[in-house]
Image: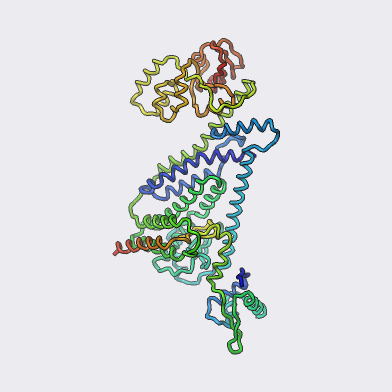
Amino acid sequence: MKLKKIPETELEIMQVVWSNDTPITTTSIKRELEKNRPWSQGSLQSLLTRLIDRGFLKGGMEGKNKTFEPLVSEKEYLALESASLLKKLRPRGSITELVTALYDTKEISDKDIEELDAFIETIKKEEK
Amino acid sequence: MENLFIDILEITLPISAWIALLLLCSPLLKRSYVAKWRYFMWLFVAVRLVLPFRLRSSITMKIPSEVSSEIHVMGNTVNTAASAPSLSQILTVLWIIGMAVFAIYQIISYISFKRLVKRWSKDISDNRILNAFESAKAVVGVKRSVNIRYCKAVTTPMIFGMINPVLLLPYVDFTDDELPIILRHELVHLRRHDIWYKLLLVAARTIHWFNPLSYLMVRAANKDMELACDAEVIKCENSAFRKHYCEAIMRLVHNGRGNKTALSTCFFFSKKTVMERFKNIVDEKIKRNGVIMFCVVAVSIAVSGGIISFATEQVEEIAEDNLQIIERPVETPKPTAEPAPSPAITDNSNVHEERSNSKSTDNSSIYEERRNSPSVDAAEDMPVYGNADVQQENTSIQQESMYIDDAAKTPAEEAAGEAVTDIEQGADKDSVYEQLGEPESVSGNGNKETYTLSDGSTAVVQYDEGVLDAGYILVD
């Protein structure tokens, strides 16, 4: 199934799933979510079902409780969200130029990294 | 309005020369001058590029000499062929479309990044980071409120937001040594309003999108901005601090490696930039800050755009006057003017004498002398002003007329379709008579006079309060 960008509320749920041990029960998800704001049981249930339909979650049972585990990793999904058409036009660095970043380049070859690492090693030695 | 593009060309051409010059000189400048010098230099260039209509008295069309002949040709055909769009109109429309495309692209990417950040960032509750942030703010001297948040969508610390800036931290475990460094780096950017600096650069490049040098300028300016920021952070810090700085950057180099299969275009540049920053950081040599140099270059850039506009303005005025006076149909513009009568000199030997007296003086005084009493010999000594045209004029020896600035003259000649020679400005009526010879007949109203000379040619001179303002000779 092809992944699609999910709305804010579903992303909130996914972030709980990603940052906790899985499989995770509905009750635990709700407890985590309510650290920020109150959630109704009904809407949480329907959003979880929708996430299963979308292919983000896999449902299971643990005793009497429903459990969920992610089918998509956070990294995978984040990559999808940031890889827009704009990203293709500007593959190196952030999507917009209007940020001041400490180091804003995504592309560098292995050989170049080796060279830079070697430079760091030399200055480390000089220190000693 | 339809000739806006011509105005832009008028800015882009002289400023391009400056960009090229600064880019070519930067390897030399880097050795002994601080990065901040170049940082401000680019700021200045960008401001000059963004404010195209400064230094102009009016927005009426002024033709830079480079394109004038082309435009003249266009103008002639347009006049006869009703209302077909002229070349300059087409170019203006293309320029505006291009500008809109680039601007829209920037806006969309800004908005979509804003959304991404909003979805993927969260507040920081870690006291280690919050304390380091507060002390870094104190060190850098940032007083305005600024948020600090974790963001999963970024791989490097950055400041985002024009009005309500947020410092975004990636999920990277920075050590206690590295944390204050990276925070200070970002806070220096914030204190210097570098996002606005970048916005200005992007605006300059958007307006001059057709000029490849504007892209090179933005790239160089971004790099110099980082170098200047690094220099500020490491100022007065010891070598251990500098070493940690390099390590922090190196960690981000590793962390930022996202898509390894992506098309590799500028690997070389990224490595070169990082290496340059490393060397800049560990280099504890004190560099000069070059305030005087900055001022000299800044003033030159400011006037170089202005002088061009001013010169073309004058030329236009002269050309217009010419057309009025001659009242002749304008013939096909000639690419080069007929050999014009040369700078006149009443007594050549006199000049030679003067020149030998001033042999030991520098070029500028020779130039002054030449303006007052031009001669063939003096022209040979002038690398800047004594170009081929002048020499040609000088060899065809005539007795009348004077010389001003042949660069400003050529379009006037083309416009009039006549051989025209400028008489030196500022002379009074008597000395004009002396130079031209007593005219056979005089017509005019005191300010603008037409003389018929003994050799059959006509001199048109214009006075301003008894002093010569402009003048030229039409050879019949």
Q: Where does residue B129 sit, x and y in percent of width and height?
A: 46, 69
Q: Is residue A22 above or below residue B412?
A: below
Residue situated furthest bottom in the rendering: A63
For the residue pair B375 and A115, the one nearer the viewer reads as A115
- Left or right of B200 on screen, residue B353: left
> Which image quadrant is residue A1 in?
bottom right
Q: Is residue B360 visible?
A: yes
Residue situated furthest right in the rendering: B82
Q: Quadrant of the N terminus of chain B?
A: top right
- Left or right of B19 on screen, residue B358: left
Q: Is residue B449 above or below residue B413?
A: above
> Which image quadrant is residue B117 in?
bottom right
Q: Where does residue B81 sit, x and y in percent of width and height?
A: 69, 32
Q: Quadrant of the C terminus of chain B?
A: top right
Q: Where does residue B429 sit, x and y in percent of width and height?
A: 53, 16
Q: Is residue A27 visible?
A: no
Q: Where does residue A60 sit, x and y in percent of width and height?
A: 60, 84
Please, which colouring scheme is shown?
rainbow
Q: Is residue B90 above or below residue B338?
A: below
Q: Residue at the location (42% across, 21% down)? A: B376
Q: Is residue B89 above or below residue B333?
A: below
Q: Residue at the location (52% across, 67% down)? A: B151
Instruction: Give the number of marks.
Output: 0
